[in-house]
Image (cartoon, rainbow, N blue to C red):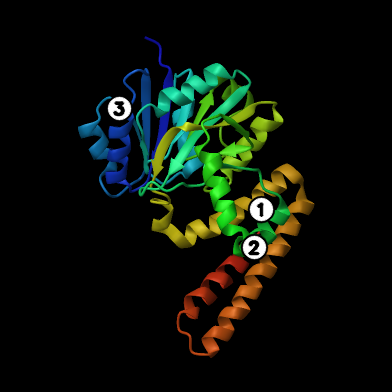
Amino acid sequence: MSTEVAIAIVNWNTRDLLAQCLVSVFGTASNTSLEVWAVDNASSDGSATMVRERFPQVHLIENAENLGFARANNQALHLAQGRYLLLLNSDTEVQPGALSCLADALERYPEAGAVGPRMLNPDGTLQNSYGSLPSVLDEILGPYWLDFLNKPWGAIGRRYRRRELEDGDYKRVDRVSFACTLIRREALDQVGLLDERFALYSEDYDWFKRLRDAGWQVLFCPQAQVIHHWGASSRQRSDWSLSQLYRSKRLYYAKHYGRGSALLLQAGLIMRFGLKLLWAIGSYLLRRVAATEQMRCQRRLIAEMLRPL
């Protein structure tokens, strides 16, 4: 039997969550022919040993160093044989019927190059499962603009968002969550693998931008559900992760919108972090000790913004 879905799972020090993920994959895919690749990015918690001992059917790639999310996924995608290719985070749990539902969506809509499920928190509440591709102003003003809107309209917006996510119909969107994305092989062959310059973050924006530019559609499939224990790996390297977040944003805009957009983003973020630093200094002078960490964080982010790409 030919492989229908090949799954790429990148892991870094999430052994127990990875085990849950693999149990959910094999336990809920009885009607789907699977090929599963686990790429371990030099974990120190015994993740690779666990996979070898408990899941011998998994193709295991062990890296001697942490190669980052994009490069590690590419290792598996390059070798995978499936008709469809699933990017799946190690901190997810696939719910019954989700894989077949996602595959059915790509069967039903040949113009779709990728599809994503409804993402849930462990307590069953909704995560953001899809969204638009961002603009520079979104990145600079977004947090403040959304905070302003959420005060009078937050309850209405949340009810609308829940109703939209619970709607049973497929929805065409700009992007879905890379925590779980099923990709049509023909689309991947045309668009290419993940850009390895994005060590962490924005590799999804970049890939979906290229997918849309190539004429493919992206679908959100609310019938498929996946639980996501968000940020299990990135929280372990919070300082590095935060720096990579904003470095990757600059790289994304430089790549797709030119140097001018990247410089505008850089200037806007420096201003934003500078204002936060001034606020933290004022708080520190008023003996609010918690501001010390905020000062260090903003100084580090400003330094990152001043580094060349």
Q: How would you rate the neighbour count of disc 2 (Cα within 10 Å): few for under 14, some for 14-19, many for 20 or more?
A: many
Q: Which mark is residue 26?
A: 3
Q: Which mark is residue 305?
A: 2
| Vertical placement of residue 31 versus 147, above or below | above
**How many dots with numbers?**
3
**With 243 as the anchor, is 27 left or right in this view?**
left
Q: What's the amino acid at mark 1? A: Arg
Q: What's the amino acid at mark 2? A: Met
Disc 3 or disc 1, which is closer to the eye?
3
Question: What is the spatial separation of the Cα atoms under label 1 and label 2, in whole angstroms?
Answer: 8 Å
Regarding mark 3 in the picture, which secondary structure is present there?
A: helix
Question: What is the spatial separation of the Cα atoms under label 2 and label 3, in whole angstroms?
Answer: 43 Å
Say if residue 175 shows up in the picture: yes
Residue 138 spot, x, y in % from top left? 68, 54
Residue 25 spot, x, y in % from top left? 33, 30
Regarding mark 2 in the picture, which secondary structure is present there?
A: helix
Residue at 66 percent of width and 53 percent of height: 250
**With 231 as the anchor, is 176 left or right in this view?**
right
Quadrant, the N terminus: top left
Question: What is the spatial separation of the Cα atoms under label 3 and label 1, in whole angstroms?
Answer: 39 Å
Regarding mark 1 in the picture, which secondary structure is present there?
A: helix
**With 198 as the anchor, is 15 left or right in this view?**
left
Spot the residue most to the right. Answer: 260
Residue 256 spot, x, y in % from top left? 72, 42
First of labels 3, 1 by sequence position:
3
| Vertical placement of residue 192 versus 300, above or below | above
User: What residue would you read off at disc 1?
Assistant: 250
Residue 29 spot, x, y in % from top left? 34, 24
* Mark 1 vs 2: CB contact within 8 A: yes
First of labels 1, 2 by sequence position:
1
Disc 2 or disc 3, which is closer to the eye?
3
Residue at 58 percent of width and 85 percent of height: 282
